[in-house]
């Protein structure tokens, strides 16, 4: 973090990487999802559960814009409003967190923005344990 601040003060611009790499990441995700859904003949299941997708969309928005996390919105909506079992709410909350944070990580790494690698090394080590 200190290095990033010092570089900004010197006027050094972060090395910009091509945006197409992130679009490639999104394309790979959606192609994989579509291959699974249509390849396994599960479109009817996906279409029947559209309220869950809406809850996850709202939960991921709140999770990305506040420190609360998407599960704090998605779980109550799934369990209390949609009547789904708590186990499903928990698993979907983890899915929102995993996909959202994974995509955010890919975006940050591909954007070329300066990162606080000194802090991140310890955080990565702690999360790996």
Image (tube, helix red, strand yellow):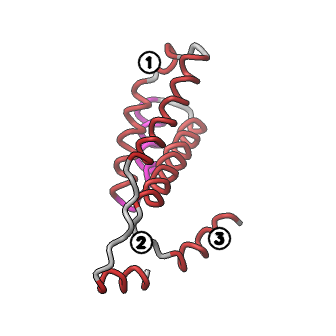
Which SS class for mark 3?
helix
Q: Residue at x 33, y 56 (%)?
A: 65
**Going by the picture, which residue comes out furthest to the right?**
129
The range drawn in magenta is 66-82
State the image coordinates of residue 79 (x, y, percent, origin top left).
Answer: 48, 36
What is the distance, in whole Å, between disc 1 and disc 2 at their CAs? 41 Å
Q: Are marks 3 and 1 in contact (CB under 8 Å)?
A: no
The residue carrying pointer 1 sits among few (fewer than 14), some (14 to 19) or many (20 or more) residues within 10 Å by Cα, namely few
Q: Is residue 120 left or right of residue 20?
A: right
Q: Is residue 19 left or right of residue 85?
A: left
The residue under label 1 is: 47
For marks 1 and 2, the one nearer the N-term is 1
Q: Nearer the viewer, residue 93 or 113?
A: 113
Q: Residue at x 48, y 21 (%)?
A: 46
State the image coordinates of residue 9 (x, y, percent, origin top left).
Answer: 29, 85
Magenta residues, dominant SS class: helix
* Count of all numbered marks drawn on residues in the image: 3
Q: Which mark is residue 114?
A: 2
Look at the image and say whether residue 70 sits in the magenta stretch.
Answer: yes
To which quarter of the image does residue 110 belong?
bottom left
The residue under label 3 is: 126
For marks 3 and 1, the one nearer the N-term is 1
Q: Is residue 45 left or right of residue 53?
A: right
To which quarter of the image does residue 118 belong?
bottom right
């Amino acid at each position: 973090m200190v290095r990033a601040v010092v570089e900004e003060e010197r006027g050094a611009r972060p090395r910009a990487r091509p945006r197409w790499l992130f679009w490639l990441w999104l394309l790979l995700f959606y192609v994989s999802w579509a291959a699974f859904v249509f390849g396994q003949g599960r479109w009817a299941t996906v279409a029947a559960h559209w309220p869950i997708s809406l809850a996850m969309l709202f939960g991921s928005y709140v999770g990305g814009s506040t420190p609360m996390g998407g599960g704090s919105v998605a779980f109550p909506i799934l369990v209390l409003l949609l009547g789904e079992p708590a186990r499903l709410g928990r698993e979907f909350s983890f899915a929102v967190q995993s996909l959202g944070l994974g995509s955010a990580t890919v975006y940050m790494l591909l954007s070329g923005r300066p990162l606080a690698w000194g802090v991140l090394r310890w955080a990565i080590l702690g999360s790996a344990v």
